[in-house]
């Protein structure tokens, strides 16, 4: 059984940093490439229950967000965040680190080591 789960995107340097930091700290991590294994609504709800950050922060605001016709009004509630991420898994902020009943978004990078050590 893993100590932590890292929702990971291998092309993201911040996400790779989280995986490397866990490895260097000898923390057993279950690394989940969420684009290959998208979270369903129930898993996203569970993640939001654990998330120490605001639910809306779980959604990336990148070019794809805008191209998809999304606005801030579309990601204000927990239910909206879940619906957007089920439809567009690539908008999941990364990395997300889950440890027990707590989870954080690993941005900025300095949050990762502190969270893993807590």
Image (cartoon, rainbow, N blue to C red):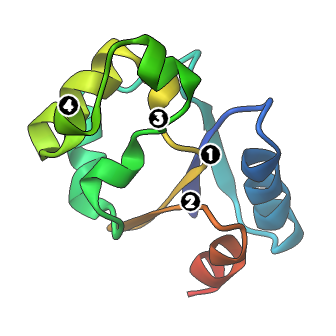
Task: Name the residue at 46% across, 12% down.
Answer: 67
Name above or below for residue 62 compared with residue 110.
Answer: above
Give the distance between the C-alpha atoms of the residues marked 2 and 1, in whole angstroms.
6 Å
In the figure, residue 26 lies in which quadrant? bottom right
Discs 2, 3 touching: Cβ within 8 Å: no
Please say if 84 is above or below 31.
above
Q: Position of residue 34 (x, y in %)?
A: 54, 27
Q: State how far apart marks 2 and 3 are (Cα).
A: 18 Å
Q: Residue at x 47, y 35 (%)?
A: 92
Mark 2 or 3, nearer chain start: 2
Q: Is residue 37 left or right of residue 55?
A: right
**Callout 4–callout 3 Cβ contact below 8 Å:** no
Between 62 and 13, which is closer to the camera in this rendering? 62
Identify the residue position indicated by label 3 in the image: 92
Tell me the CA gap for discs 2 and 4: 30 Å
> What residue sits right under mark 2 in the picture?
4
Q: As displayed, is residue 13 above or below residue 107?
A: above
Q: Residue at x 57, y 64 (%)?
A: 3
Q: Report which residue position mark 1 lands on.
A: 30
Q: Is residue 101 above or below residue 96?
A: below
User: Which callout, 3 or 1, points at the residue further toward the start of the chain?
Assistant: 1
Which residue, given by chain and number where applicable, does mark 4 sit on? 74
Q: Earlier in the sequence, mark 4 or mark 1?
A: 1
Q: Nearer the viewer, mark 3 or mark 1?
A: 3
């Amino acid at each position: 059984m893993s100590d932590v789960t890292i929702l990971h995107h291998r092309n993201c340097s911040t996400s790779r940093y989280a995986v490397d930091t866990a490895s260097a700290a000898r923390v057993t991590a279950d690394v989940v490439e969420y684009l290959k294994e998208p979270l369903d609504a129930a898993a996203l709800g569970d993640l939001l229950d654990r998330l120490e950050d605001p639910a809306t922060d779980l959604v990336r605001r990148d070019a794809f967000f805008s191209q998809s016709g999304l606005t801030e009004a579309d990601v204000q509630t927990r239910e909206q965040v879940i619906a957007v991420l089920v439809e567009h898994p690539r908008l999941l902020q990364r990395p997300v680190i889950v440890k027990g009943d707590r989870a954080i978004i690993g941005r900025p990078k300095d949050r990762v080591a502190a969270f893993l050590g807590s």
